[in-house]
């Protein structure tokens, strides 16, 4: 990774923080992008908020699957809100500066919500595994107390890890350009601006990525390998289709989210491109949270019925 020397005139800019370039290379599209991302943000808030609302209010959606889905929808709102409002502000005002503390805070929350999403998706896969592979024990195994413990664990286990990782990254000296070629304070663009040896920090990033991305993904793959083997043994095509429909939405979300995340954080440095990183980040931080409610509602009859009841009131 290339690092520049530290000129004396950068001592002052170091205290002032960074500049998020975002989409500065497309000046003629600034207002179009502002309008586009504002519409996307509103769609994310409304669609995930609606899913959260109906899973809390509708008596037909009071199972563990919808308990996890309501938490997932709320998490999506938090995840997007960690990055998108600042990006909209930068596009609207053209003031792209962000202080060191604000940058560290944004990174920490983005990492925390992203890590929580990985763990929660693994929990949701476990829920589907128990429902399909052990249906008779499902109400006992996935009772409310267990569900609350699993969700609480997903939200809290990453807090000390992500705080420590953020602290380690922002303890590095930064030199040369303070321009972050990204629309939010992500790990890789920040590390590109660091001076000196960053081997320890890169190792930490890989360890955290393995723990919070690869391990949950492997657990999900394990759950679905068991689920698919059970589904294929069912006697009729109707029962197979019904069983698969209960987990197909979740599987689609998993592949989209983990696929883009693994490509971004675990591919070799030689293949890293700032432009590619930016596009992939847009995909998993903005586009997937917009599509997730559609995926869950279109392929779920219970959610569609609950939406119809809500709209008919």
Image (cartoon, rainbow, N blue to C red):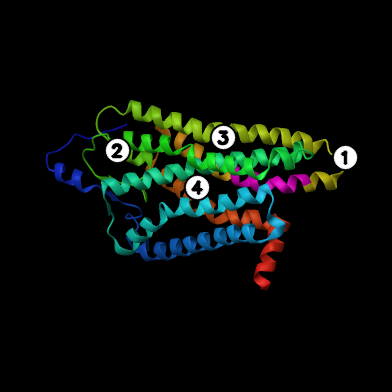
Q: Residue furthest right?
A: 235
Instruction: Please state which of the two labelled residues, at mark 3 or mark 4, is closer to the viewer.
Output: 3
Q: CA distance from mark 3 to mark 4?
A: 17 Å
Q: Which one is nearer the viewer's eye here, 138 or 215?
A: 138
**Residue under label 3:** 216
Q: Position of residue 48 (x, y in %)?
A: 56, 58
Q: Tag 1, which secondary structure? A: loop
**Residue under label 1:** 235
Q: Is residue 32 above or below residue 291?
A: below
Main SS, magenta region, reads helix
Residue 250 magenta-highlighted = yes
**Residue under label 4:** 284
**Residue under label 2:** 170
Residue 178 magenta-highlighted = no
Instruction: Please state which of the two labelled residues, at mark 1 or mark 2, is closer to the viewer.
Output: 2
Give the magenta part as a residue range: 243-254
Examine the image and state in which quarter residue 119 appears.
top right
Q: Position of residue 249 (x, y in %)?
A: 66, 49
Question: Which mark sits nearer the N-terminus, 1 or 2?
Answer: 2
Residues at circles 2 and 4 in contact by the CB criterion of under 8 Å: no
Q: CA distance from mark 1 to mark 2?
A: 57 Å
Query: In the visual, does 9 lie left or right of 120?
Result: left
Q: Residues within 10 Å of mark 2 (few under 14, many from 20)?
A: some
């Amino acid at each position: 990774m290339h690092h520049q020397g530290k000129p004396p005139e950068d001592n002052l800019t170091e205290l002032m923080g960074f500049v998020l370039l975002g989409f500065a290379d497309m000046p003629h599209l600034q207002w179009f992008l502002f309008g586009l991302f504002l519409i996307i943000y509103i769609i994310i808030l409304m669609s995930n908020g609606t899913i959260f609302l109906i899973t809390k209010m509708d008596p037909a959606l009071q199972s563990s699957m919808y308990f996890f889905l309501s938490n997932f929808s709320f998490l999506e709102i938090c995840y997007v809100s960690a990055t998108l409002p600042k990006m909209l502000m930068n596009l609207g005002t053209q003031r792209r500066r962000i202080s060191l503390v604000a940058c560290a805070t944004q990174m920490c929350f983005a990492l925390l919500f992203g890590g929580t999403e990985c763990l929660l998706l693994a929990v949701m896969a476990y829920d589907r595994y128990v429902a399909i592979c052990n249906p008779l024990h499902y109400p006992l195994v996935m009772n409310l107390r267990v569900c609350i413990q699993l969700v609480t664990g997903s939200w809290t286990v990453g807090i000390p890890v992500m705080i420590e990782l953020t602290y380690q990254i922002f303890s590095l000296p930064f030199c040369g350009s303070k321009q972050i070629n990204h629309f939010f304070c992500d790990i890789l663009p920040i590390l590109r601006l660091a001076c000196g040896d960053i081997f320890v920090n890169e190792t930490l990033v890989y360890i955290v990525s393995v723990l919070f991305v690869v391990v949950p993904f492997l657990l999900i793959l394990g759950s679905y390998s068991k689920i698919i083997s059970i589904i294929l043994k069912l006697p009729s095509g109707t029962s197979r289709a019904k069983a698969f429909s209960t987990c197909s939405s979740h599987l689609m979300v998993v592949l989209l989210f983990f696929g883009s995340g693994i490509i971004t954080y675990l591919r070799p440095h030689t293949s890293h491109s700032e432009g590619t990183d930016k596009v992939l980040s847009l995909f998993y931080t903005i586009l997937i949270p917009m599509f997730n409610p559609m995926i869950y509602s279109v392929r779920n009859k219970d959610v569609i019925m609950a939406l119809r009841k809500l709209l008919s009131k």
